[in-house]
Image (cartoon, grey):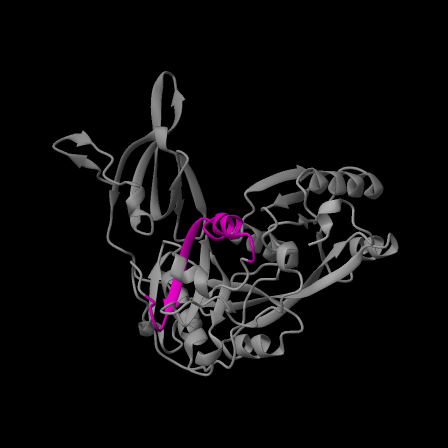
């Protein structure tokens, strides 16, 4: 890989090049007082806090310290691969991928478990990702979970796969189930071929107009912004009305029609009474008629926040949004599509089935039978 200009190695990429294909050289180690270099070719998927993430064509994500860079340049985009099957992944792996695509700003480890807090915005970002061994007896683990969330003024939730031994054990302790959810996956290439992507604008920026259509922020707009903008490589889609934004518009062609907004996220502690997939209610005049979000992380594109204004249902906008986001994710090396939808949202399940998604392992959230802290009433 050649990174020289006038005989000198140069870093000719910046954080503004996120989303582009790059070639970078870094110092991998010092051996016998001499630097050993390593080259990485792939899509620059993030650059923040002094760390670059580059996703190779294989789906591997390489994290590179900015301080180790010695050269870097933009290279022509590789031909887009179009695998016709999603990557293999089991239920725990899909839940981990979904969590990474909807990241909580605060995370703590309890053995293999992941405790997540995001200011009360959505259960996914404010619950324990409970897979593996917490490293202590279950009673002790649950006491620590309750205490950790109480310190943050949040109700304790545990995300648990349905029907597992942990699910049964929590049920035996009186933890009540809420919000049944199913993970759904699909190959990304056929989704990108669905019709209407040319009607959609994609942007890296989370705008007030986009948020005006998203109905789950409740009284937590700043917490929502933090979670929504987190992730390795995040894109926001807007379609219809005032769907102006900066960035690329999608392109695609093939079949599907939508009858409802199928929101791919579960309402969290701040809006526990809201109905998933009901469509945006906050759309101010001139806001987009439809929105969506995707977080691209290696071989997976995690979709969420797909919503359509009630007066624009049955116009194919949800399909168009999904197609545009899928087309963008394909260019970044993803091959699988993943979303989570409430199990009782029949309309959303039907929409995603038409788009090629198949259901996987279900899960739900459990919480103590009584409020663990005064902050639990909301």
Q: Is 288 displayed left or right of 20 in the figure?
A: right
- Please say if 313 is above or below 34: below
Percent x, y of residue 165: 81, 55
Residue 325, compared with residue 133, is above or below; it is: below
Q: Residue at x 36, y 29 (%)?
A: 68
213 lies left or right of 33: right
Residue pictured at 53% horizontal, 53% vertical: 102
Q: Is residue 7 visible?
A: yes
Relative to the observer, which residue lies in front, 33 or 193?
Answer: 193
Place of residue 39 in the rendered image (x, y in percent of width and height, measured from the top left): 33, 38
Q: Position of residue 22 (x, y in %)?
A: 29, 46
Q: Residue furthest front?
A: 285
- Closer to us: 160 or 305: 305
The residue positioned 39% from the left and 61% from the top of the image is: 209
Q: Nearer the viewer, residue 6 or 122?
A: 122
- Quadrant for the C terminus, please: bottom right
Q: Which residues are magenta?
A: 218-243
Quarter of the picture holding the N terminus: top left
- Identity of the residue furthest to the left in this view: 6
Q: Is residue 260 above or below residue 172?
A: below
In the image, 334: left or right of 162? left
In the image, residue 238 lies in the stretch drawn in magenta = yes
Q: Based on the displayed image, in which of its 4 quarters is residue 36 positioned?
A: top left
Rendered position, 48 above or below 173: above
Q: Is residue 329 visible?
A: no
| Residue 235 on the magenta span | yes
Specify the farthest residue to the right.
Answer: 172
In terms of depth relative to the viewer, which is nearer, 36 or 242? 242
């Amino acid at each position: 890989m050649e990174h020289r200009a006038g005989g000198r190695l140069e870093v000719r990429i910046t954080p503004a090049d996120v989303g582009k294909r790059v070639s970078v050289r870094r110092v991998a180690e010092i051996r016998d007082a001499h630097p050993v270099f390593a080259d990485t070719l792939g899509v620059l998927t993030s650059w923040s806090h002094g760390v670059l993430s580059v996703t190779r064509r294989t789906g591997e994500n390489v994290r590179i310290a900015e301080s180790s860079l010695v050269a870097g340049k933009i290279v022509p985009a590789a031909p887009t691969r179009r695998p016709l099957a999603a990557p293999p992944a089991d239920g725990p792996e899909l839940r981990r991928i979904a969590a990474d695509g909807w990241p909580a700003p605060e995370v703590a480890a309890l053995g293999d478990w992941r405790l997540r807090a995001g200011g009360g915005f959505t259960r996914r970002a404010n619950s324990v990702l409970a897979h593996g061994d917490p490293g202590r007896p279950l009673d002790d683990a649950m006491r620590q979970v309750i205490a950790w969330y109480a310190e943050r003024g949040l109700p304790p939730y545990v995300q648990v796969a349905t029907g597992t031994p942990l699910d049964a054990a929590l049920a035996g302790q009186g933890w009540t189930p809420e919000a049944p959810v199913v993970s759904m996956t699909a190959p990304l290439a056929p989704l990108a071929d669905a019709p209407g992507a040319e009607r959609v604008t994609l942007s890296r920026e989370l705008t007030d107009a986009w948020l005006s259509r998203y109905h789950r922020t409740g009284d937590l707009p700043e917490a929502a912004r933090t979670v929504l903008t987190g992730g390795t490589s995040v894109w926001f889609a807007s379609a219809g009305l005032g769907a102006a934004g900066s960035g690329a518009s999608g392109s695609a062609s093939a079949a599907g029609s939508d009858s409802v907004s199928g929101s791919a996220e579960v309402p969290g502690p701040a809006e526990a009474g809201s109905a998933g997939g009901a469509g945006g209610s906050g759309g101010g005049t001139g806001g987009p008629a439809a929105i969506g979000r995707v977080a691209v992380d290696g071989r997976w594109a995690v979709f969420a926040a797909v919503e359509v204004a009630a007066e624009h249902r049955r116009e194919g906008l949800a399909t168009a949004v999904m197609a545009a986001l899928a087309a963008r994710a394909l260019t970044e090396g993803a091959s699988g599509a993943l979303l989570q939808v409430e199990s009782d949202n029949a309309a959303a399940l039907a929409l995603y089935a038409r788009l090629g998604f198949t259901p996987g392992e279900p899960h739900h959230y459990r919480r103590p039978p009584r409020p663990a802290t005064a902050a639990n009433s909301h």
